[in-house]
Amino acid sequence: MLNGNKIIVVMPAFNAESTLEKTCRDIPRTIVDEIILTDDASTDRTVEIAQELGITVNRHEKNMGYGANQKTCYDDALSRGADVVVMIHPDYQYDPRLIYFAVGFVINDICDVILGSRIRTRRETLECGMPFYKYISNRFLTIIENLVLGQNLGDFHSGFRIYKRKVLETIPYSSNSNDFVFDTEFLTQAVFFNFRLGDIPVPTRYFPEASSINFKRSLKYGIQTIWVMLKFIFQKMGIAHFRLFEPEARGS
């Protein structure tokens, strides 16, 4: 609890047995009230390790996808009374220690959404192991998203995110994709509903155990991201209307 705010960390997990304990170890428990892991039908010991660590575990009996995983995470966090929800991948790619600093932007009402940006400098990002094609696609898509959405964020595709409760209560994320484009849809919705977005630098780590989608999936994700931007434009211009932008009131 920090300044009267209940802080819950959620981790969408799939085959994270080799990195889960390290990720949990670096989460600042002095301010985090609860950690929730949703396992998307892993075939390794992710669930067993999570239980040994004493964190709350939800489990999908069959693999439902990254977006579906987050939906379960957020539903559970809201039902447990979270005022601030931190989403971080359990693959140890992002530094959980920075949660301590990042939540302050939300708790002090400076931002409604905070992202961890992996792109502080090109040199640092590439030296930390981000594949060059991922760096180029990230830069291209982030530029497009900033232009379309009127933002100035460094990294629209981060797996380190912090949300104020009101954001999750307003955005109709239950109707979003169950795939990776869920993240893009969510941030686009946040802009549409006039929430304030910001970011902080988060050094990243790329190594064999860290989760990463392949080139084919990355290409599909890029195309889907462009389509979400077009939906935003069409909605704003009144050319079409999408369920993506219809508010969903959830009870507190």
Image (spheres, rainbow, N blue to C red):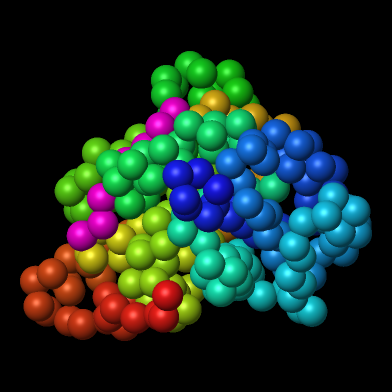
The answer to whether residue 136 is visible is no
On the rendered structure, is 73 left or right of 195? right
Q: Nearer the viewer, residue 38 or 107?
A: 107
Specify whether 74 is left or right of 139.
Answer: right
Q: Quadrant of residue 93?
A: top right
Image quarter for residue 120? top left
Look at 22% across and 64% down and name the residue there.
Answer: 192
In the depicted structure, whether residue 2 falls above or below residue 136: below
Tell me residue 227's x, y (percent). Answer: 32, 66
Name the side, left or right, on which 175 lies relative to 72. left
Asked whether 199 or 98 is in front, the reply is 98
Q: Residue furthest front?
A: 4
Give the quadrant of the C terminus: bottom left
Per the image, is 200 magenta?
Answer: yes
Tell me where residue 165 appears, x and y as whole percent.
42, 62
Prevailing secondary structure class for the magenta stretch in the rendered image: strand
Magenta stretch bounds: 194-201
The x, y position of residue 98, in whole percent, is: 54, 32
Q: Seen from this angle, which residue lies furthest left?
A: 237
Residue 165 as seen in the image, left or right of residue 159: left
Which residue shows up at 74% across the image and 42% down it? 24
The question of residue 39 being in magenta is answered with no
Task: Name the residue at 33% across, 76% down.
Answer: 244
Above or below, 173 relative to 144? below
- Percent across and percent down for residue 99 are 54, 38
- What is the tally of numbered marks visible in this picture? 0
123 over 134 or under it: above or below = above
Q: Is residue 31 visible in this depiction of the protein?
A: yes
Q: Residue at x 27, y 80 (%)?
A: 246
